[in-house]
Image: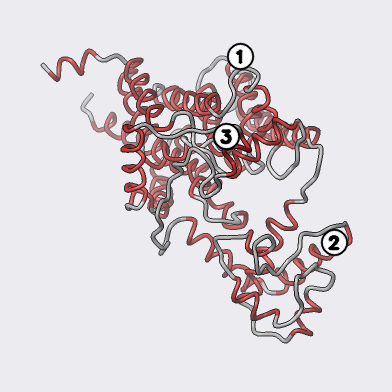
Amino acid sequence: MVGAAIQRVTARQLKLAALALFLIYSWPGFIGWDTREHFLQSRAGHYTDGHPPAIAVLFRFTELFVAGPAPFLLMQAVSLLYGLDLILRKRLAPRAAALSASLIFLFPFISGVTGLIAKDCLMAGSLVLAIGLMLDDSPRRHRFALLLLLFASLMRWNALAATFAPMILLFRWHPRFTGVRRYAIALVAWLAVTFAAYAINEALTDEREYLWYWGYAYPDIAGTINYMPEMDDATMEKLLEGVPLVEHDNLHRRFHELYNPAKQYHLMRDKGSIFLIARNQAERDAIGAAWKRIVFGNPGAYLRYRYENFRLLVAIDRPPTFSRVYVWFNVIAAPEVIAELDHDAAPSRIQAALIDASVAISLSPLYYLYLYFAACLLLLPLCRKRLEIALILSAIGYELQWFFLAATADLRYSQWMVICTLVTAVLVVARLIRRARPA
């Protein structure tokens, strides 16, 4: 009887049940520091380039109708769930596709990130929808997919690493274009989408934060110095000439004491920091020159520091924490944000139980990201179809870029890799099972 009842559940009901369960867990959306920044900028109507300003503009639009994070939570969740279904139904029967999409959507790592209002989730949802549309032969759907790819690129500065393989392998302007012409048009489309996203965000920017100088150059300088041989202050002053420093004595020892491959703000914003934020172009030029001297002059030390960061990112020997999942309805340990954002939320009893379970699971091997990265590499030689290859190359490319770009070890950076890994695994297994069946 139970089996018969399960068989009567339709594909649509499966997806709606998955969405409902997710919303019970995460409604109205979890808030982080980045989310706070998007809200404040959207309400002020003043946009900086510390985050893609298109996100704040989108917040401003959604708050015309509903204040708070709920519209974004719906946007992230619905686009991801239905994008997964759109991809999987090309290889599986509708009900099997809906079940697989729902299980991937609810997979703890993926849903744990999707519940956070963040650019990573906005990129992932629009990108899976675009990939699903590009599996159709209709030129109209491929052109609509371009808009979704542009949206994904607007959400994250580094989305180009995720969009490249899917666009090159799957995008087709028109069925009459085949072979080299198809790939050439796809490459031009990828370049157009990528540069258009940068241009739009640039046009929306009211104030520059010069993020690279303090968000990337400072951690690179500090991390590289940590693994360089000990130097006296005179040598350090020469390497750091013109860089704004808090103090100028015992520099190498202070860099060594402050070194933390998983953090960056302690270098220039916390008590006991060593750097000052650059105040003018001359200081920014000095930071750029110091970065070149230190990084290019000591590539071994730089790569060792980047490796330590990447190890933490993929959870190799990552120390236990109280939580590896985002489950706070306001910025953690910052109660002043409640009044600042005019937003307050607390979990229901069911939500509290689900959140406790989510935290417990986040400390399990399901959150060891190196396992998913290893799965990507193992799946790569098994991929035969364009879709499989596009997904796995997108996963590998997007994750590997963090070796050089990750300033912290945030798990949300790897959501796209986990999504692609699980979807590719389902596609490959389904193909192998189908091939093994007797004709």
Q: Secondary structure at mark 2?
A: helix
Residue lying at 77% horizontally and 51% vertically, measured from the top left: 210
Q: Secondary structure at mark 1?
A: helix
Q: Secondary structure at mark 3?
A: helix
Residue lying at 10% horizontally and 16% vertically, measured from the top left: 1
Q: Quadrant of residue 19?
A: top left
Q: Earlier in the sequence, mark 1 or mark 2?
A: 1
**Which label sits on residue 123?**
3
User: Which residue, as the protein is rendered here, is positioned at the far left?
Assistant: 1
Q: Is residue 12 left or right of residue 411?
A: left
Q: CA distance from mark 1 to mark 3?
A: 22 Å
Percent from the top left, x then y, of residue 316? 42, 61
**Amino acid marked by disc 3:** Met
Percent from the top left, x then y, of residue 134? 54, 24
Is 23 above or below relative to 208? above
Q: CA distance from mark 2 to mark 3?
A: 32 Å
Badge 1 local density, few (<14 within 10 Å), some, or many (20+)? some
**Amino acid marked by disc 1:** Arg
**How does the figure colour the protein chain or chains?**
secondary structure
